[in-house]
Amino acid sequence: MILLALVVVLALQSLRTLFPLLFVFGEDVDYYLAAGIGVASFAAPVLAWPLHRVLGPRSAAPIGVSALVVVRLALQFLHPIPLWLAIAGTATGLVALSLVQAAFRRSGATGGRLFVQGIFLGLALDTAIRGAFLTWDVPWQEGIAAVAVTVVVAVATLGAAWMMLPRASTEARTGPSVWRTAALGPFLMLQLLFLQSPSFVASSSGYSLEGGLTVVLVADAAALGAAWWVSGRSVPTPVGFVGGLILAAIAYVFTQVVGPIIPLLLLVAQVLAAGLLTLAMGESGRLAAWRIAAGWAVGGVALALLLAGYQIHYEVPLPFPNTFLPPAAGLLLSFGAFGRHEQPAPEPLRGIAPLVLVPLLLLVVPLALVLDRPDRSVVASAAPSLRIVSYNIHQGLNPDGQVDPEATARTIEALDPDVVMLQEVGRGWPIHVFMDTGEWLSRRLRMPFVYQRAADPQFGNAIMTRLPVVEHDAGFLPFGEGPQRRSYVRARIDIGQGRRITLIDVHLQHQKDNRATREAQIDELLDVWDGEQRTVIAGDMNTQPDEPNFALFLDAGLLSVQDEAGLGHLPTATEEVVGGDRVDYVFVTRDVSFSGVAVPYSFASDHLPIAVTASLGPV
């Protein structure tokens, strides 16, 4: 069980590296081709069967785990991470998991129960590690702490594999069928997107990152208890199906609702997911190793299609809403629980108690984060002006698809801002390895922030500042032809001496040929502004200076600080990515004086920041 938990950690760390690299590949080449590469990578477990035949049942699993350890170490030390290595990490991770599952089944009737418990222990450990690094996944980091964690887990995994796996008998006696094993794909989709995501909990509920991490770990403890309770009892098929319906309904709610109810729903969903997976893994029957390989391959393809479909919809819309995909995962997981199940002797309570304690002991991580929380207190301003930076941060991805929020933070720090208006703030999206960029930057820059979701709760806009925010609000813009929902966030800042300035941060529709939608969004934005004086409107407008959409701002009486400063010739996006486009702007009302306009080059994002010093006259 310990070995499986460690393999889960290494496999998930490896496969998560694939998402941002494939996203950038899709942006640069073709989204459908990127999705095809992803599906092929996740189908790799089909190779487990020939490996099992060639290497033998005693050696296949240890060698597969060893290959995963080698690739995972390569991901840690070979930077920038190349796409081919991320593909190899995904493939070896899934192959190793399928081989280890086959070894688990050799333990007989209790193998399915032990397998599910090992999966949840691994999920909890993986979540705690990511939480300790504020959700910045360790393969992308070069610091001593990240390297040390990786080496310790890798060495422990390697040692456990060669000490434990060769002792298993040569033949698996019982196990789930292909379609039951395939239920692991939908199960992992829900885990990655929601149930193991502190970023999702924080962005959707308004909790801090520490609070989100606490919720997830407590839910993992409850899931281990649910797996223990289900494994020794007869659960009629209709009960499992009803559980699947409830899980599907909650998964849909996750895509629609924000608020303090999210943690409670996540706890219920995780308990249901644990019970359904335990039922799926608990069938007794004659098992050939090829069935486990085939089941993992089918499940891997399902996982890739569900996650890729959920994400790609925001660029290349599906013929149906992507909000249908998480509920579909819940239903597919419940289908795996249909039919006859093994009934091993119920595990004594004293046997499950230490396992339930593991996620609870891992609560030391959010506690440490609370104790180490940086000072993000609001301070009053004594300066006659304030430095404003508007920046589309591309979710912390550089143009090569490397996850590097530290480069984003350094770029912002160099401009010494009082206020940062951010677009494309990822708070758990798959293409950004499920990282909470908003919370990470807030802690790193020591700035509180206000956030507004856009496409979904895990992607939106944010305003960060240590100056007093008197009030703030937000809203959605017309959807038009999509494919993403867009939003704005507004904050009124007290800059001292009785002076206040209004900041409106926005990101408009991005597809170039959809000017009508952008026009409708600009009209709505100008209505929200309503001519209020002492206002700054900034963001990624996705329009060029020679297009009619740009003129709408000027016709409303706003000034473009970049053009007024004689810097209109400078692009605001890196030439390597989008041909040097100028799509980002800072507009001010005529009663706002400005100076020090700058558009410095940085490779931290595919956009460049715009910085300006704004001043207000006496009240």
Image (tube, rainbow, N blue to C red):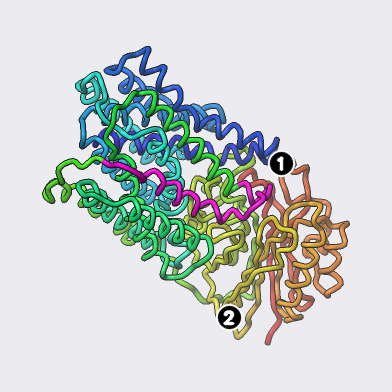
Disc 2 residue type?
A: Gly
Give the distance between the C-alpha atoms of the residues marked 2 and 1, in whole angstroms: 41 Å
Q: Residue at x 19, y 21 (%)?
A: 167
Residue for point 27% across, 27% down: 103
The percent position of residue 323, horizontal first and vertical second, equals 56, 56
Report x, y in % for residue 613: 68, 66
Report x, y in % for residue 468: 53, 76
Residue displayed at 75% across by 71% down: 588
Q: Quadrant of residue 154?
A: top left
Q: Is residue 178 magenta?
A: no
Question: Residue 224 — which label?
Answer: none
Q: Can you give x and y, in whole percent of width and height, for residue 581 in the image? A: 78, 48
| Foreground tag (2 vs 1) | 1
Location of the C terminus by quadrant is: bottom right
Q: Which element carries disc 2, helix, strand or loop?
A: strand
Label ID, residue 577: 1
Which mark, residue 496? 2
Locate residue 41 relative to residue 168 in the image: left or right: right
In-image side of 550 versus 262 (left or right) = right
- Placement of 468 over or under 143, stated as above or below: below
Q: Is residue 358 visible?
A: no
Query: Where 200 falls versus 307 (above or below)?
Result: below
Q: Which range is magenta?
A: 312-341
Label 1: how many residues lie within 10 Å, few (<14), some (14-19) or many (20+)? some
Q: Is residue 317 magenta?
A: yes
Q: Earlier in the sequence, mark 2 or mark 1?
A: 2
Q: Nearer the viewer, residue 563 or 229?
A: 229
Identify which residue, 519 or 111, lies in the foreground: 111
Mark 1: amino acid: Val
* Mark 1 secondary-structure assignment: helix
